[in-house]
Amino acid sequence: MTQKSHLHDQAQALLIQQHQLDQTNAHLDRMLGVLDSMGQDQRSNDELLDSLLAQAQSVVDAQDVVFVVEEHERVLFEREVLAVPTDYQTTLQPLKLLDIVEIDEDWSDCLAQLDSYAARQGLERAEDPFCGLMTDSQRIALEKRIQADFTLKAAACDQYDYMIAGTCGLIGGLVDVFFVGVPGTGALGKWADEQTDDMVKGFARLNGWKGGREGSNKIASAIGFLEEKFKINYDHATSHATGGAVQNMSMKNHHVKSLGHSPDLLGLFFSILDQFSNTAHFVDKGKLISVNTKTFELSGGNLVAKVFAGFMNWLGHLFSDMAGSSGGRGKVDAGRGSGIPIPFYSLLQFINVGSFGQHKQTFATLAVKVFEAGYDMRHGLAMAIPVLITELLTRTMWVIKQRFYHQRQWRDCLPTPGNPELRRMLVVGHGTLCLVDGTDAALRSGGNIVAFMARGNLIAWVRLGTLAIKDLKACYAAGALDVDVVDAYLEAEYARLLTA
């Protein structure tokens, strides 16, 4: 039996029990009505008897009659008058017995008894028993609450909302233009590179790195330590290493072409697969290519231990590549080096369509070229900052406007995801950010498609896309039930009941 069917049977049982309760209340009402009628008759008879006695006493008093009843006359009256049976018969109003249901501990037997009761009473099985369990007022109140709290609503923004959102997006866009720019050049880009270097050195220390020799290149030493400690079998750096199976692969792009180097669930899957199956998977011109490698032995005595060892190899190797290779960063005039791609960026190589630029290259080829220009996860961290600024500014200004302009309580000013006005303001804010970013990229790229993409803020465009889809869905389904909000409410209520 499914959970839905079980709940439906329970509701049906409650509906039948509600009918029993209604019948019992009706029966009690009839009993009270009969008792009240009998009480009224009794009071009427008492009043009539009192009136007759008063009249008789009045007649006696007027005639000065004195009754003297001897003892033998009293006995004769009781024997001859009172003891004689009469033809008077009392009138009874019989009440029918209630139809009952014997409750059994077994749920199936209980349902059978309730179904039998419903058949005797002529009750039809309700298609929606939950509706029958509520009164009209309760049902109306529930419908109002669902409409107010659990339905998707279209945004009702005023001019100030749009002005605030546009200003927040403009601020984020200016931060993106002046402090991010192309990979590795802006102030935020350099800050992200430094933070990544510190993360790599910190992770190396956790794994036993002693800090390198005095006067040595610390980051190159840390990267080399991690490369030696977390070796993997899919770290092919050139096309020659793959036997020509993957074309045009070099030190600058092998991290994006190798799926095991992707810092996301896709990369974790292919990393574990490659380590277990002694293969390496790459993407080239929209195709997935598998290359056999040398036998690779994972640590651990059982499957769980080997999977954990594979996960640690994947994570440690990502840290070793996050800030570039030890060879590249160890040179005197070393640049940023080739890092790892932004999460899920490798999937862009499967979009092998179109013909762009002077050399008529496909979108997949352009994605690789952009990565070679430094568009890696470090640059992704820098690009995320203007997006975060726009997000936080928009939410903060919405809260301030709700509190001080609309005079709402603080508890009603929480920037919840389901608020339609806030959702629309976020779309406008991030749309403005993307407009500034796209305009700047178009003006500064000089018609070079790779330079245009390298200057574009992919994080901002992805965020705008997700927000726009949600807003379009809400506009299209305005008035429909918001399942996410209902689930969140039910989970909160369940947690409250557990802690009560």
Image: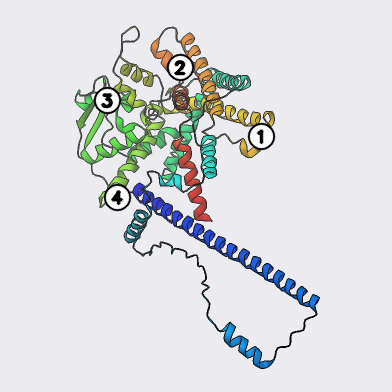
Q: Does residue 214 appear in this view?
A: no
Residue 41 figure quarter: bottom right
- Residue type, numbered disc 4: Ala
Mark 3 is surrounded, within 10 Å at the Cα level, by few (under 14), some (14 to 19) or many (20 or more) other residues, namely many
Sequence order check, earlier mark of 3 and 4: 3
The residue labelled by disc 4 is: 305
Residue occupying image coordinates x 47% and y 40%: 486
Between the residue at mark 1 and the residue at mark 4, the CA separation in whole angstroms equals 55 Å
Residue picked out by circle 2: 455
Residue lying farthest to the front in this orientation = 63
User: Residue at 47% across / 28% down in the picture?
Assistant: 381
User: Residue 229 location, x and y as percent?
Assistant: 34, 41
> Residue 44's x, y, as percent?
65, 65
Question: Answer yes or no: do the residues labelled 2 and 3 have beta carbons within 8 Å?
Answer: no
Whole-angstrom CA distance, mark 2 to mark 4, is: 43 Å
Q: Is residue 80 left or right of residue 409?
A: left
Instruction: Look at mark 1 in the image and give the residue it sits on.
Output: 408
> Label for residue 283?
3
Q: CA distance from mark 1 to mark 2?
A: 42 Å
392 sits to left or right of 265: right
Q: Alpha-carbon neighbours of circle 1 within 10 Å: few (<14), some, or many (≥20)?
A: some
The three-letter code of the residue at mark 2 reads Arg
Identity of the amino acid at label 1? Arg
Whichever of labels 2 and 3 marks the residue nearer the N terminus, that label is: 3
Please give the name of the residue rendered at 48% of the width and 30% of the height, measured from the top-left corner: 479
Q: Is residue 11 left or right of residue 68?
A: left
> Is 45 in front, or is 431?
45
Task: State the SS at label 2.
Answer: helix
Report if the CB atoms under discs 1 and 4 are less than 8 Å apart: no
